[in-house]
Amino acid sequence: MSLELGKAFDRCYWLRLPFLTTNYNIGIFFNKRSTFLLFRVDPDTQEGNAVAGVKINMFKNLGTSRFCGTFLELHNYRKDTLDIQNQFNGIKDTYYDEIIFTLNETMNLYKVEYNDKTFYDNLVIYGLTMTLYNSEFVFLIAERQHIDKRLQKKIVRTTGVQIATSKSLEVLNEYYEESIKCGKAAFEVPAPLENPDTIKLEDLD
């Protein structure tokens, strides 16, 4: 299936991940000079192992994802030199045994020199799954950390894609319902924090 891309996307990073009896080829399209992100997900049809009942969802706002709202801590912060929305900040302690990492990769795109300091504009990719359904559930987070030299600001944006079987989604929904009853789910964007602990690059000021 072809994917039409506009001028906003000028780079692509491909991953090949196992899923049940096949593999999925996942393309992360982005712009070297902005925070634009887009996923493309294709099953490996050359293997001839079609997987029925698999649902694929993309989340431009990670806060709307039941997986993220239930299991993950998301970080938001804004000031003159920083604009961070839904940065992945770790797995909630309550669910540490239920969620595992499948990958954690960082790609430095270019170097920025500012006030005798060095910063890196990069793409960070996290892969997570549910421990009991590690072959039936994948959640990828692509995080763009962009240094806008004109605005003298670091901008962080994230996008997620979820690949899941019907059975794993049933279990996810059970976790979600349980977290709602216990008050553990968090879908509201929190207020700006006093201390930006998860910022990976220094402030620009």
Image (tube, helix red, strand yellow):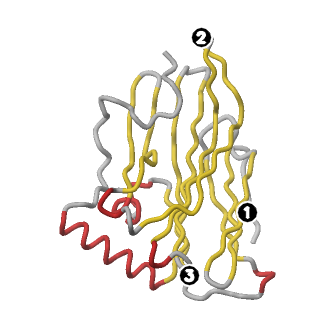
Q: Is residue 150 above or below residue 59?
A: above
**Residue 134: x percent and y percent?**
52, 75
Question: Residue at 59% of width from left, 58% of height from top?
Answer: 103
In space, the residues marked 3 and 2 are separated at their CA atoms by 50 Å
Compare marks 2 and 1 and give the one earlier in the sequence.
1
Compare marks 1 and 3 and give the one earlier in the sequence.
1
**Local SS, label 3:** strand
Residue type indicated by callout 2 = Asn
**Residue sitting nearer the eye, 95 or 65:** 95
Question: Residue at 23% of width from left, 67% of height from top?
Answer: 180
**Numbered tag placed on residue 49 in the rendering:** none
Q: Is residue 57 above or below residue 142?
A: below
Q: Marks 2 and 1: CB-CB under 8 Å?
A: no
Residue type indicated by callout 3 = Val
Compare marks 3 and 2 and give the one earlier in the sequence.
3
**Would you name the residue on which mark 2 appears?**
115
In space, the residues marked 2 and 1 are separated at their CA atoms by 41 Å
**Would you name the residue on which mark 1 appears?**
3
Residue type indicated by callout 1 = Leu
Q: Is residue 100 above or below residue 153?
A: below
